[in-house]
Each structure stands twice: as C-alpha cells, then as structure tokens.
Image: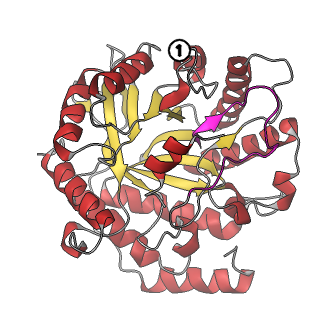
C-alpha cells in the first residue's frame, strides 16, 4: 500500500466506453474535420549506446536523450481516453505544443479497461485512436513511451478483470500487451513500452486483498500504484516481479522485438532494511528489461540521498530514465541542482504537461499554475534542442 508521503508528493497528478454508435460518430467527425499536420522528417530508430549508459540514433554517434512529458491527463483531470474520441484536435494541439516546448518524447498512459472492456477482443474505437496517435507522433516528430495496464480510476476497471485470480490476470495483461505491440511494431514513433506504472509486490498477503493502491486526495482520486499479486504465497517478492516481467516481455516480443521494454518504478524499489520496499529491486528485476525507469521527485535538503537513489538504480547495469520528476518537494534552485547532478547517472528525464502552454498559465491564480509555469520555463531552457 502506498504511504502517505508518497500520496502527498504525487497528489498534483491528476465515463465509460461510448456506445458503438456514438464512438463511430465521434471517429467520423474527427477524421473529417481535424486538419492534417505537416509531415516531418521520418523519425530515426533509437538504439542502445555501446557504453550501456544511454541511447543513440541508429547508425550514428549522436546521443538521444529522452526529454519530455507525461501526458497523463488534461487540465480538467480527465484521462486521455475520456476525451480523445470526441476532442481529437485537443490531443493534436497538445502534441504540437509539447514539441514546440522542446520535447522529443511523450509518455502516454493507456487504461486497461478502455482497451478491454470485455475479455474477448480489444475495443475497436480505442485501437483506432491509438493508431491515430502513432500517426500524430510521427508527424510531430515525437517518440512515445507507451505505458499500459492503467487502472487509475477504480470505477473504470471492468468487473470481469477485477475478479480474476493472479494467473488469469497476468494472462489478460499479456493479451493487452500482445495486442498493443502488434498494432505498434512498425511505427518509428515508439520509443518504449512501459509495462505498468508503479507496480508493487506486497509482502505476505495483500491487505486489503485489492489490486490497486489507495486513491489520492487530489483531483480525480486516481490510483497510480497497482499490485501484481495479492498473495506472496511463500515466494520471494523479486521472483514474483521477475516472472511477471518475463510474462509480459514474451507477449510483446511475439510481435515486436525492435522497440525497448521497461517498467516505471517507484523510488522506494531499493531493498533497504527498515524502509518501504516495492519488491521490484532494480538490480534483481532488470535482466529482461532494456532500461530501467525511476520516478524521482527531488526534495529540499535531500539532494545527496536522492542522487544516491538514482545511482543505485544505475548500478542495475541498464540505462536509467527518470520517467517522472517535478519541482514539487524542492525549490526551483534545488530542483535545478538535482537535474544537473543527475546527468551522471540518468539517460533521460520526463516531467508533466496538462495541455496549457506558459501563455495560458496564471501563476497568481493557483499554486499548481505557478509550479507548472516554473517547470515549463526550466524545460524549455534546458531542452537538448537548445
């Protein structure tokens, strides 16, 4: 279960599948009236650098540094699938804005229940919109970090899925990833598949015996932490994590062995006695992953400790991407110090974008706007394109 302090520093983040007729109508409207984007130069493939520290554009010595945004919700705390059927131009505009701000990668969070409301086959409308997003990313010159299996809003989780036991749930998750990989394998816009946001292996028997962590108190009441088992059943927590990773990687590789696979880990994934532990120790679970992601929010007065956490992730022997970060718990000066110092071990960084460029933010109206304005100013100033 996620601790209170983790809930606090994530609280800033923030109905159902439309009927077939409504969904088809929405698709027709957006396909007919959304203006085309100007085609960009084809995105080159990205590969591992020989030093194992980061990434290169294929066939060159030019480093690729992931620098981008979590596009996890909009300014109204709506998840992507809440509006991408009827407001596609909003999505397209947001992608153009993120590119203009200096991003080269966007992390998109896909909700399991919107792609598999029923167990038999994927939802056609969601698959169609995913295809449109691939095209949008290619045209805007943005790579995608596709994070899957989201169950961020508990009311959206299908009852059939919630009722599965561990083995059946893993099979459903593998089917999700096999379906996504088959649809995305040929797109040059895929940077990576992120198996799940912040998975956890509980110690002993999960309490309560629920797949999701507690909802957060901020707008949306989202559940970002998800358990991959609810009963340890005498197994080592790392063994459960490795088996789960292997199951999903195999499913992806049935259709796509070209693009990277990773998983988004909480910073409390280090196995340190007396401290909270997710069961996903990076040095013990990274074997089947191409690189490791950590979600790390620097804190005032804790720079050395936060950098030590990052260094421990890097010791797993794979490139490390800071997949979530934000100046929430640190002053802007200390946040900048962390970002600068993190270059020793990190190969990429992703913050947040919720559909409002700096010109639309009112720093005098809310703390959230003020934080976002400072973050976006930093993001533009430090973009690798500068």
* Place of residue 313 in the rendered image (x, y in percent of width and height, measured from the top left): 44, 20
Q: Is residue 234 visible?
A: yes
Q: Which residue sits at x=52%, y=70%?
A: 78
Q: How many marks?
A: 1
244 horizontally vs 55: left or right: right
Can you identify the residue that label 1 sits on?
A: 283
Which stretch is magenta? 195-216
162 horizontally vs 41: left or right: right
Q: Which quadrant of the structure image shows residue 374?
A: bottom left
Number of other residues with Cα within 10 Å of mark 1, as a class: few under 14, some 14 to 19, many 20 or more: some
379 horizontally vs 257: left or right: left
Of residues 62 and 80, the one drawn nearer to the viewer in this rendering = 80
Of residues 205 and 183, the one drawn nearer to the viewer in this rendering = 205
Residue 210 forms part of the magenta stretch: yes
* Place of residue 383 in the rendered image (x, y in percent of width and height, measured from the top left): 18, 45
269 above or below 158?
Answer: above
| Quadrant placement of the C terminus | top left
Under tag 1, what secondary structure? helix
């Amino acid at each position: 279960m996620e601790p209170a302090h983790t809930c606090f520093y994530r609280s800033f983040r923030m109905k159902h599948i439309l009927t077939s007729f409504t969904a088809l109508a929405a698709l027709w409207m957006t396909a007919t009236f959304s203006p085309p984007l100007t085609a960009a130069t084809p995105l080159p493939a990205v590969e591992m650098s020989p030093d194992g520290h980061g990434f290169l554009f294929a066939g060159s010595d030019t480093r690729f540094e992931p620098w981008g945004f979590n596009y996890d919700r909009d300014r109204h705390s709506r998840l992507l699938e809440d509006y991408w059927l009827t407001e596609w131009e909003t999505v397209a505009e947001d992608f153009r804005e993120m590119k203009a701000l200096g991003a080269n990668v966007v992390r998109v969070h896909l909700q399991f229940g919107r792609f598999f409301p029923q167990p038999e086959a994927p939802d056609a409308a969601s698959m169609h919109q995913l295809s449109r997003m691939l095209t949008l990313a290619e045209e805007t010159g943005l790579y995608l970090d596709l994070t899957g299996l989201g169950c961020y809003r508990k009311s959206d989780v299908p009852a059939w899925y919630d009722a599965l036991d561990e083995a059946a749930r893993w099979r459903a998750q593998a089917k999700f990833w096999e379906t996504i990989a088959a649809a995305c394998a040929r797109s040059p816009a895929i940077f990576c598949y992120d198996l799940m946001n912040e998975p956890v292996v509980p110690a002993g028997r999960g309490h309560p015996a629920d797949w999701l962590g507690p909802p957060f108190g901020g707008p949306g009441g989202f559940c970002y932490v998800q358990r991959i088992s609810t009963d340890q059943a005498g197994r080592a927590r790392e063994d459960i994590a490795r088996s789960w990773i292997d199951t999903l990687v195999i499913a992806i590789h049935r259709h796509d062995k070209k693009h990277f696979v990773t998983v988004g880990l909480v910073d409390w994934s280090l196995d340190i006695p007396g401290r909270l532990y997710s069961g996903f120790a990076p040095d013990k679970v990274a074997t089947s992953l191409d690189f490791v992601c950590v979600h790390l929010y620097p804190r005032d007065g804790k720079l050395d400790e936060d950098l030590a956490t990052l260094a421990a992730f890097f010791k797993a022997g794979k490139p490390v991407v800071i997949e979530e970060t934000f100046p929430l718990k640190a002053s802007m000066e200390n946040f900048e110090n962390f970002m600068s110092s993190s270059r020793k071990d990190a190969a990429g960084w992703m913050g947040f974008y919720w559909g409002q460029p700096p010109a639309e933010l009112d720093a005098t109206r809310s703390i959230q706007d003020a934080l976002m304005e400072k973050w976006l100013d930093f993001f533009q100033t430090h973009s690798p394109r500068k």
